[in-house]
Amino acid sequence: MRVALPLGITAALVAACSPNTVADPDGTGGSDESVPALVYGNTDGGTTYTLNYNVYSPATDKSPNSALVYEPLVRIDYSDGGNLVPWLAESWTFSPDGTEVTFALRDDVTFSDGEPMTAEDVAFSLSIPLEHAELNATGATYESVEAVSEHEVLVTYPAASYSSLNQFANLQIVPEHIWSEQDLTTWTNPEPVGTGGFTVAAFSPQQVTFEARDDYWGGTFEVQTVKVVPVTQDTVKAQLLSGDVQWGTVSWANGEDEFVALDPEVNHYQLYATGGAFSAIFNTGRAPFDDVHVRRALAMTIPRSDIVATLNRPGTEAGPTGLVDGVYADWLLPEYQGLVQEVDVDGALAELAESGFTVEGGALVREGQVYNPTISFNTDFGWEAYADIMINSWRDNLGLEVTPAGAPGAALFEQQQTGQFDITINATGGAGVYGVYSGLSSQYLAPEGEQAATNYGRWNDPATDDVIARMASTADPEELRELGHEMQQIVVEGVPYSPIYTSYWFIDINASEWTGWPTPEDFSYIPSPQQGPDTTLTLLGLSRAES
Amino acid sequence: MPSRWAFLARRLGFYLTAAWAAITLNFLLPRLMPGDPSVAIVDQLQRVSGRQLPPETLVSIQTLFGDPDANLGEQYVAYLGQLARFDLGTSISRFPTPVADLVAAGLPWTLMLVGTTTVLAFVIGTGLGVLTGWKAGGRFDAIVTPASTFISSVPYFWVALIALWVFAFELRWLPSSGGYDPDLEGPAFWLSALRYGILPAATIVFSAFGGWLLGMRNMTVTTVREDYVLLAQAKGLAPSRVVLRYAARNAMLPSFTGFALALGGVIGGALLTEIVFSYPGIGYLLYDSLTKRDYPVMQGVFLLIALTVLVANLIADSVYVFVDPRVREQG
């Protein structure tokens, strides 16, 4: 049963002669002593948790894993292009003009206090962000919600919004009979009651214990107890090796050698594409990056393969479209499928010649104007090394001297929002092809110095606006696919940003106690402890390992 | 005798003034700094959701945390009133949890861990310092002094990680993370807290005692050459009495000041210890609030640190008066 490696054997011997609860996470807690708890080592950063299960609270640090208790209407399916699939809503239909959507709810859902979930609960929940601006953390774009029958809810938008249902994957349904009596801004919801498969059995600042419900609409769990403990990224690796922790989300550079190879049957280290990428975003609102040829020249000389080699993730170079192969294979134009963008010096020099800019003394010069570009990136992520790889390539291949301008996350974010950058590194992408591209709409355009919520690169292109508007107002998947192709061409040719490498969810699993985990080769949900309904699906799929 | 009390009263006046200055600076600094915490919270919300929030959100959040346009004088009076009620405000990132609750949750752990280890490191280091200094150049000194210098020059996090690896993962004698076993209650819980504390405490003491040893040893070396020590030996007093009452008592004065200051630093916690061992103390709370621009929490912890350092200094000053007669003669 125990992980069979030298470390584990020594450990077992010592553990046998010392009463060590940590060495034996199975021995304590849980309703049924014979069923071991599943322990998730949460590496989000803190050493303690604060009790706050008010999922609409304006706090940024709430209690962990509220998605085991509260559920949304829809689920984003990352195994299928980020499409929306039913969860608490069985189906949905748009009005012909696309401004109204009716959700048909499941009729078998109950809250953990036994009350059935009705359309009134859903209408109440979805109204919370509309009635309290400070609780609108998901940025709801609809304008009204109404229960039209016992199991139907009507949501109204100000404009046709076929493609904006993603937000309902982040809005949790809460029981009106409990929440309507509270001041939702300051309430901390100490005893959460939701539709999810688990309830909070015990809360301590260093451990949250979830207990499975036996009347969950989605099925029955063999896993009876899930424990969430705060650990550091280094410690969790050792705890995964020993089996003290069985589930984690830590990125493990040598995970294949240090973890999986020690016991391939039990130890799993998996990467699932998030559908997004880390990209170089150009500030198209200011010179010289308002010139497409300059953007192309720089994009063509980003050494993507060197960067992913340094990252220890070979083969994860991102294509040029902003859509990632792992998730959007069905959506990508054939010529961009699996495309690795190699450094193209000749092409870049040709583009630079066409731009009318010359490189003099490391600066870009045109008509007497001298530009010394900078690249800003997040120092919290240790991005200096990758920025250097790009800077060196631009210097060697184009003679261009780009100055590094690293900043900690919060400061960088402010610069990006207000457009105070030449080139910046940020995550791009979203759920669904509309979600990936809608941020390029001039609807989000803000003048430099003012905060933009998205479209940091100040992309202002009528053709883009036209395609995005048509995406929002179509319900036909084929038309959406066509429009997606048009957007890919716009991004590849216009280069508002240039994707560098694909981003992933990292999943670490020690399957000594529980089996039935999906694999990146064969999955219909992400086995992550932080993915809402996907977490629930993962837990439903687990069964006791043969001892 | 009266001069002793007059001296203390003057010191007390000085410390009260310093405390007032600390409180006022603590009030002013965040308000003079650029950046608006409510913008920070909206930023974080937008980062989490990846969507644009309506402008009303910013206004609503500003009203949650008090009116930013209020008169500075009125704010100052309100702030002093809050402090008098031990109300440190509300955390931004962990809204609506009061800062006082967060501090109260972390403070006992930090006080127990860092307080105990500071005293232990001082006692062990100073004790060994007397022994090595008394027979400077002897065999004991030749081994212990270089060894402790070496140990104290090893970075703490490295010691902690090695200890974690050996005792928690290889030998599995002790738990690897956390401050207690959350599944236990009552006396068993407290026993578990002791057990979880062994490794963090041992690493701190291990890393810290060397500094005390060196200081004490060098002071002892100079003190034992003083005439009054020679006289005590010549009188035929027992060696232990000479070491403790004549040499150590005088050599200890500088170390004692350092010790009082170290006690003042206890509240600041041991950030690295808390990170390596996921210990539920106050050091991580401060670190977390700094990275998240959680001004109320920062202010609360800073104030606590400033006040404890002042109190520790006051105690050091006052005890000094009783330990070292020369101080009060000058007063």
Image: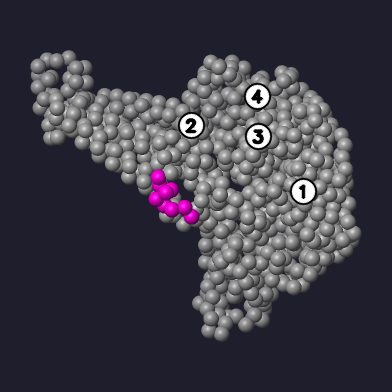
Q: CA distance from mark 1 to mark 4?
A: 37 Å
Residue A189: mark in rendering:
3
- Which is nearer the eye, B165 or A52? A52
Residue A25: mark in rendering:
4
Which SS class for mark 4?
loop
Main SS type for the magenta part?
A: helix
Q: CA distance from mark 1 to mark 3?
A: 22 Å
Which residue is disc 1 drawn over? A168
Callout in the foreground (2, 3): 3
Q: Residue at x 55, y 17 (%)?
A: B186
Q: Which residues make up the magenta segment? A: B69-77
Q: Look at the image and tell me in which quarter the C terminus of chain A lies.
A: top right
For badge 4, the amino acid type reads Pro
- Which is nearer the eye, A398 or B187? B187
Which SS class for mark 1?
helix
Examine the rendered structure and indicate whether residue B209 appears above or below residue A381: above
Q: CA distance from mark 2 to mark 1?
A: 38 Å
For badge 2, the amino acid type reads Ala
Residue A527 visible within the image: no
